[in-house]
Image (cartoon, coloured by chain):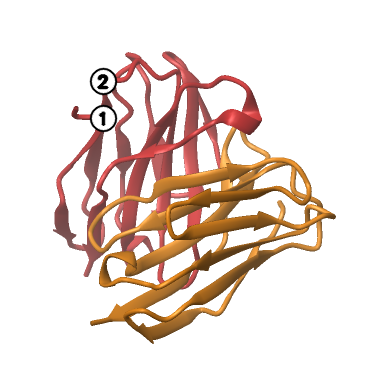
Chain colours: A orange, B red
Amino acid sequence: TQLLEQSPQFLSIQEGENLTVYCNSSSVFSSLQWYRQEPGEGPVLLVTVVTGGEVKKLKRLTFQFGDARKDSSLHITAAQPGDTGLYLCATLGNYGQNFVFGPGTRLSVLP
Amino acid sequence: NAGVTQTPKFRILKIGQSMTLQCTQDMNHNYMYWYRQDPGMGLKLIYYSVGAGITDKGEVPNGYNVSRSTTEDFPLRLELAAPSQTSVYFCASSPGGIATNEKLFFGSGTQLSVL
């Protein structure tokens, strides 16, 4: 089973600051997904990246897939309290079309 | 738009009791999954199903059972609850198409405590 590492584990910032969180593995990703999970809810898919070097933007969120497809980053510009949540990266696992999840980065954006 | 619906939202069990976590989806998805989420550990796959009548074990199946009699429903059964099963349980579904385009749709979870 591919193991995913995420850093940092926790991040607390003020509204308006920028931040970057990371996801990496010792193995090559076939594809990588980023999910956001709000308290008391299930994860919601933000983006899927497939091609090495790929960059995708979703409003203030920028997702980058490493050239070697072993790492990915999520950058948030001008963070808002609504960005608070647990950010999970995931990649295809070994069961059906299951996804294996990293432990997550818990982000808190203070007003 | 109901999506994936899980019940109950919260439950407290005594050691040795049994219960069924309900999950239903209205998106006609072929694939359904049960995950558990422990603090700092990400989500771990318990069981999955690729269609009605077909189920298989995931990474952490011990102590659990599932069935899939219809496309819509995928209940998770705990037979003899143990404190190690204290966790948040998520049901998810996906269409089951091209793997790199797959998207998981999650329910809102069941928080289970075994005391």
Q: Is residue B59 visible?
A: no
B25 sits left or right of A98 in the view: left
**Chain under callout 2:** B
Residue B3 circle label: 1
Relative image position of residue B77 (x, y in whole percent):
31, 39
Q: Is residue B29 visible?
A: yes
Relative image position of residue B38 (x, y in whole percent):
41, 66
Type of amino acid under label 2: Asp
Q: Quadrant of the N terminus of chain B?
A: top left
Whether B68 is drawn above or below B2: the answer is above
Residue appearing at x 32%, y 78% in the figure: A109
Q: Secondary structure at mark 2?
A: loop
**Residues at marks 2 and 1 on the same chain:** yes
Whether A32 is drawn above or below B41: the answer is above
Residue bearing mark 2: B26
Relative image position of residue A64 (x, y in whole percent):
66, 57
B71 sits left or right of A2 in the view: left
Residue appearing at x 68%, y 39% in the figure: A94
Mark 1 residue crowding within 10 angstroms, few (<14) / some (14–19) / many (20+): some
